[in-house]
Amino acid sequence: MLLPPAVKLGLAIEVLAESADASASIAPHRVGDYRDVGAVLDFARGVDVVTFDHEHVPQAVLRELVAAGVAVRPGPDALRYAQDKLEMRGRLAELGLPVPDWARIGSKSDLRAFLGSHGGVAVLKTARGGYDGKGVRVVRSADEADDWLAGDVPLLVEEAVAFTRELAQQVARRPSGELAVYPLVESVQRDGVCAEVIAPAPSGGRVAQEAARIATTIATELGVVGMLAVELFETEDERILVNELAMRPHNSGHWSIEGAVTSQFEQHLRAVADLPLGATDVRDDWTVMVNVLGGPADGSLDRAREAALAAQPGVAVHLYGKAPRPGRKIGHVTAGGVDLDDVVYRARAAAAAFD
Amino acid sequence: MLLPPAVKLGLAIEVLAESADASASIAPHRVGDYRDVGAVLDFARGVDVVTFDHEHVPQAVLRELVAAGVAVRPGPDALRYAQDKLEMRGRLAELGLPVPDWARIGSKSDLRAFLGSHGGVAVLKTARGGYDGKGVRVVRSADEADDWLAGDVPLLVEEAVAFTRELAQQVARRPSGELAVYPLVESVQRDGVCAEVIAPAPSGGRVAQEAARIATTIATELGVVGMLAVELFETEDERILVNELAMRPHNSGHWSIEGAVTSQFEQHLRAVADLPLGATDVRDDWTVMVNVLGGPADGSLDRAREAALAAQPGVAVHLYGKAPRPGRKIGHVTAGGVDLDDVVYRARAAAAAFD
């Protein structure tokens, strides 16, 4: 999804892809392993700036790039906080930003103690590699975590926040420090996966100001360059707490392709290419994005796409060139308009064509 | 510009490019000559449907494709009317559509006679290959045309229409006959080249209905599949006359990338892939597109792009990956909003950064 804004701005782009599958093959690409220092260095020598669409490139690889004089944006000193939840929690706490209660877990007794002081329920997380509900589990007794505790993966535990909804705040930052703040959005999760996003978040009000303050503080203090997505909990007592960070275009910002003057993908390119940032104003009163998860059981995306386009000629349908598979994010749809109920209905109807 | 909607819809796309220059190299492509039947046939065998971004592919090549069972959209029976102005004028006159007075010119005396019956001034055109003011000249005496008359290029002559403004009407048509009609737009020409487009055309009114009727008649009667652009003259006595046809996404429709729910590029892909057409509603009260012609004299597009983005963060800047050269269309900018004067100002200001 970074390719269309590269075409628009006339910027050359090249992708280092894990495989020559359909998603990557529409862009100029070469195939290589992002964990292979040699492959990444060789790739990086041909470009002006390197950026990422996931946070799994190892710190060792990133630091080799920097040492070789490659412009890496965001850089390893920022990315570590998106790669490791222990580092992230520690740094945000240091900055005085609101986070759930949390603790590093080195032993079963650490977990037992945390459960004891938090009503007997908590969220256990692997510090690295989790996404879309993976690497996260709710525990009610320390015994439940024996398998994870037996491994050598660093763990942390967090209070099970009694939240009323989840929110996400996008902000872009240039190397110079220039910031562009998007409207706060509400994200609706199902089974740990983002299902829908409503932009702007209904009844944002005071919370929106606080979310913007938190996200701009994080972007500035952590030296993020590019898009930053801050996932937030809103609690029953109207506080907001930082849940996760992503330093790249994020699912919670896909609405911006049609819904904002400058999409998060174009904004990310502008920021990492050190170009002036674009306006973040909304283009409709309401924009609703619904993920297409899994896809048709018979594997026929052609028929589902045709049905979606026929049923909802005003809804934007995005498909990622991925084969249907249960639970896989294979696309998303976006509707916009003045009446939220109507916009939600149209977006869901288009997405339902892929069930 | 067909690449971004292909990414969006998850459609695989491949370009047969004249050369591996910057414009083509961002898309999956192979290099070949569109006049070479063998090269085009070989290319076409790997795809489901072939379409065009210009009208210069020879009829002989198109007919070989059709004979080989390739889906060619639009097909040669429609494209001939976009390729040859004599055929176009003849067919539109047959359909009773409003066109300027015209005549085939076989000799100097034909031209002299036409000038005599049209106030001593007329527009001489080559039947084929003209664009952006090329292949078109105003003549006031038959002697002026000696060079063209000496060649073996078929010529036609048309009355010099006393027009008050130029308009363009876009319509898309699917193989099934389904149509999608865009708002009528005004195009401002300078030196025979489109400089600006205003969507919708100010004070369209009754003329807009007539333009839609003309364009849908042409699309249906000529069997166009894909986008059709009908360039029109509005006369002092409030008639509209058909000037030119293009059966592809056209400069007069670039505004639709940001300004319409479905851009002309996505619509063209939908139509030729036989997918349901998208909504053509406008997204702003006014959308203004200004072409970037020539580019900076010092050849530095980077600095101009930066200046344009910095000065107008709400304007969409499109650059085509082409090197600056006097008069060359190297990009366009698009602004939208509620106040036409303001929208025109912002678009022109962004384009001026490239002067």
Image (cartoon, coloured by chain):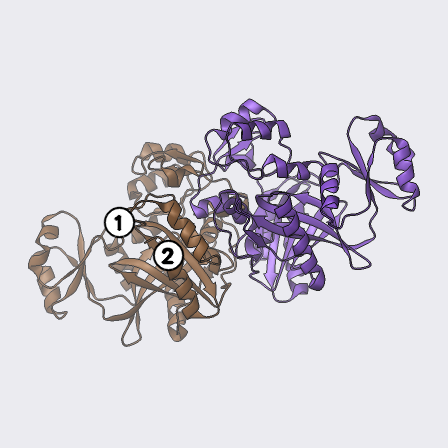
Chain colours: A purple, B brown
Q: Is residue B140 visible?
A: yes
The image position of residue A10, as x and y in percent, is 42, 45
Residue under label 1: B326
- Which of disc 2 and disc 1 is earlier in sequence? 1
In terms of depth relative to the viewer, which is nearer, B217 or B327?
Answer: B327
In terms of depth relative to the viewer, which is nearer, B8 or A77?
Answer: A77
Three-letter code, disc 2: Ala
User: How much space separates mark 1 and mark 2, taking CA atoms?
Assistant: 15 Å
Q: Decide: is A41 above or below B328.
A: above
Residue farthest to the top, as pictured: A38
Q: Is residue B254 visible?
A: no
Residue farthest to the bottom, as pictured: B237
Q: Decide: is A81 above or below A313.
A: above
Contact flag, marks 1 and 2 (Cβ < 8 Å): no
Three-letter code, disc 1: Pro
| Number of residues whose C-alpha sits closer than 10 Å to that of mark 1, classed few (under 14), some (14–19) or many (20 or more) | few
| Number of residues whose C-alpha sits closer than 10 Å to that of mark 2, classed few (under 14), some (14–19) or many (20 or more) | many
Q: Is residue A228 toward the left or the right of residue A95 in the image?
A: left
Secondary structure of residue under mark 2: helix
Quarter where residue A58 is shown: top right
Quarter where residue B183 is shown: bottom left
Q: Is residue A12 toward the left or the right of residue B59 in the image?
A: right
In terms of depth relative to the viewer, which is nearer, B14 or B277?
Answer: B14
Residue under label 2: B351
The image position of residue B12, as x and y in percent, is 50, 40
Is disc 2 on the same chain as disc 1? yes
Q: Quadrant of the N terminus of chain A?
A: top right
The image position of residue A119, as x and y in percent, is 92, 46
Q: Decide: is A325 above or below A255.
A: above
Read off the chain for label 2: B
Residue at (66% x, 55% y) in the render: A213
Return the mark for residue A285. none
